[in-house]
Image (cartoon, rainbow, N blue to C red):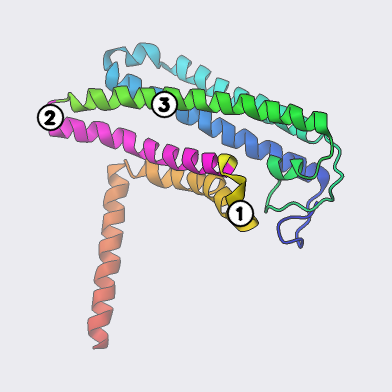
Amino acid sequence: MRMYDGCQAISYMGCAAQLFFFYFFISAEYFLLTIMCYDRYVAICKPLHYGTLLGSRACAHMAAAAWATGFHYSLLHTANTFSLPLCQGNALGQFFCEIPHILKLSCSHSGYLREIGLIGVSVCLGFSCLIFIVFSYVQIFRAVLRIPSQQGRHKAFSTCLPHLAVLSLFVSTAIFAYLKPPSISSPSLDLIVSVLYSVVPPALNPLIYSLRNQELRDALRKMMTGCFSGAINCLFSGV
């Protein structure tokens, strides 16, 4: 198969492996973000029950369920997608193997309908998680606003905002990528949106979550202050 610009090639099995691992990690991350939302809900709304509801065994079971669900989800999509005969050439209008672009190369009506059905189930599952997340955050914000001290509210919000930032970027770009109107679809736009939801959120995860660490914030502040002072000194020494 040939990629976006026609200059890059990937084998059939390589494309299948790429698609499997891509949807496996994307779906597992979404399920883990949903679990993390539940973690914050229990920590803020039911703090006295946190040890009971989210002990080490419960966390291990939920994480295993997220990875197992992501595995079966990606396996079903990969098996069905690559069981379709391709009769529209082998050039993908994308820089990696993705289901919608592979379906454009297929000429099997029944296989296409099966994949559309799987995508429909995936959308229902994704929206169910999204509804759960929205409901949880409504309860979280209501509980936070009832906290009497400003310091307590700030601490609660600082716990939720990094997770909410990553989740918002991930969900908004993914929804736009798969549900945008065909009239505004173009290879360049598809490329940009795919990068936004497949590359940017995982890359930002370590940065956003680690910024909650006070030592890292202090080190980053010192580094930025040192760079700024050095730039000022260089400017005035040149004068």
Q: Amino acid at mark 1?
A: Leu
Q: Quadrant of the C terminus?
A: bottom left
Q: Residue at x 39, y 13 (%)?
A: 53
Determine if the magenta segment contains residue 171.
yes
Q: CA distance from mark 2 to mark 1?
A: 46 Å
Q: Residue furthest bottom?
A: 239
Residue 128 appearing in the image? yes
Image quadrant assignment for residue 132:
top left
Decide whether the magenta segment is chiefly helix, strand or loop: helix
Q: Can you identify the residue that label 1 sits on?
A: 191
Q: Is residue 124 left or right of residue 103?
A: left
Q: Is residue 236 above or below residue 84?
A: below
Q: Residue at x 36, y 39 (%)?
A: 162
Residue 173: percent from left, percent from top = 50, 44
Q: Can you identify the residue that label 3 sits on?
A: 133
Label at residue 149: 2
